[in-house]
């Protein structure tokens, strides 16, 4: 039996409330803190940098999963690892070619951090075929990156199921993370499709009872790996 992990996202937070929010979701039962980093170029929104991440690191024992929605991820990725990231997720779309992306993943894995790659809703999952054997995490974006509160794109379920089957067939060890539009109404089908980590921004942040919301997202259910 596997446990589905819940990773509240920092995206809805203002910079001033980040450390407070990290403490609150840890107390509410979250497993991971998903740190959305945006540079105002790769996506229109701009958030915080690795120096702010250092303050978050000091405020929580949660694993910090840093999602780099930035134009030049390799310029900053190692700084985020240095200042507290346990895992770093690069966007497939931020690289000029697959060779460059493979090199980036291999370079960052030498730091000891877990390394993943995210794909946007319009990017076919097949582009990751050559990469899967190197990855610790595959992040399926189930909304367009850069804006919290969007509706879950149902076609994402096909990608999740494909990645789940692929790792079973090939013996890969990556975890499947899903980010965007996750709420208590769809979390179970996303998990059943093969997701290991459910990233939730608005659903957790806007909830009056975050402990209950995290429990609802998890579903208090176990899913057979097979």
Image (cartoon, rainbow, N blue to C red):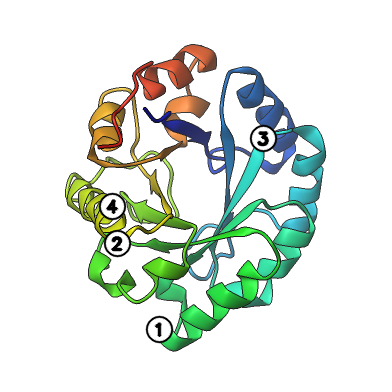
Q: Nearer the viewer, mark 1 or mark 2?
A: 2
Q: Is residue 103 above or below residue 188?
A: below
The residue lying toward the viewer, choosing from 82 and 14, is: 82
**Which residue is at 63% across, 77% downward?**
107
Q: CA distance from mark 1 to mark 4?
A: 24 Å
Q: Is residue 195 above or below residue 118?
A: above
Q: Nearer the viewer, mark 1 or mark 4?
A: 4
N-term mark: 3 or 2 = 3
* Side of 157 where 53 appears, left or right: right
Looking at the rendered structure, the number of numbered marks drawn on it comes to 4
N-term mark: 1 or 4 = 1
The residue lying toward the viewer, choosing from 76 and 130, is: 130
**Which residue is at 46% across, 75% downward?**
94
Q: Are marks 4 and 2 in contact (CB under 8 Å)?
A: yes
* Side of 120 where 74 appears, left or right: right
N-term mark: 1 or 3 = 3
Q: CA distance from mark 1 to mark 3?
A: 32 Å
Q: Are marks 4 and 3 in contact (CB under 8 Å)?
A: no
> What's the mark number on residue 168?
4
Q: Nearer the viewer, mark 3 or mark 2?
A: 2
> What's the mark number on residue 170?
2
Residue carrying label 3: 62
Residue carrying label 1: 98
Classify mark 4: helix, strand or loop: helix
Q: Position of residue 161 (x, y in %)?
A: 21, 48
Q: CA distance from mark 1 to mark 2?
A: 21 Å
Q: CA distance from mark 3 to mark 2?
A: 31 Å
């Amino acid at each position: 039996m596997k446990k589905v992990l819940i990773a509240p996202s920092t995206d809805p937070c203002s910079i001033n409330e980040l450390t407070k929010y990290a403490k609150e979701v840890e107390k509410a039962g979250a497993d991971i803190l998903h740190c959305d980093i945006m540079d105002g170029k790769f996506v229109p929104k701009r958030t915080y940098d690795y120096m702010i991440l250092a303050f978050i690191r000091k405020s929580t024992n949660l694993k910090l999963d840093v999602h780099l929605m930035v134009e030049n991820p390799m310029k900053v990725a190692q700084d985020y690892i240095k200042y507290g990231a346990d895992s770093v997720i690069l966007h497939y779309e931020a690289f000029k070619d697959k060779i460059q992306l493979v090199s980036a993943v291999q370079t960052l894995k030498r730091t000891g951090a877990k390394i993943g790659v995210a794909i946007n809703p319009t990017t076919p999952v097949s582009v990751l075929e050559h990469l899967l054997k190197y990855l610790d995490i595959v992040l399926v974006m189930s909304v367009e990156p850069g804006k919290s509160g969007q509706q879950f794109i149902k076609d994402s379920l096909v990608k999740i199921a494909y990645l789940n089957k692929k790792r079973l067939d090939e013996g890969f060890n990556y975890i499947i993370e899903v980010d965007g539009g996750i709420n208590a109404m769809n979390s179970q089908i996303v998990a059943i499709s093969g997701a290991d980590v459910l990233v939730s921004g608005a659903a957790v942040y806007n909830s009056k009872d975050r402990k209950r919301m995290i429990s609802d997202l998890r579903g208090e259910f176990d899913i057979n790996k097979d």
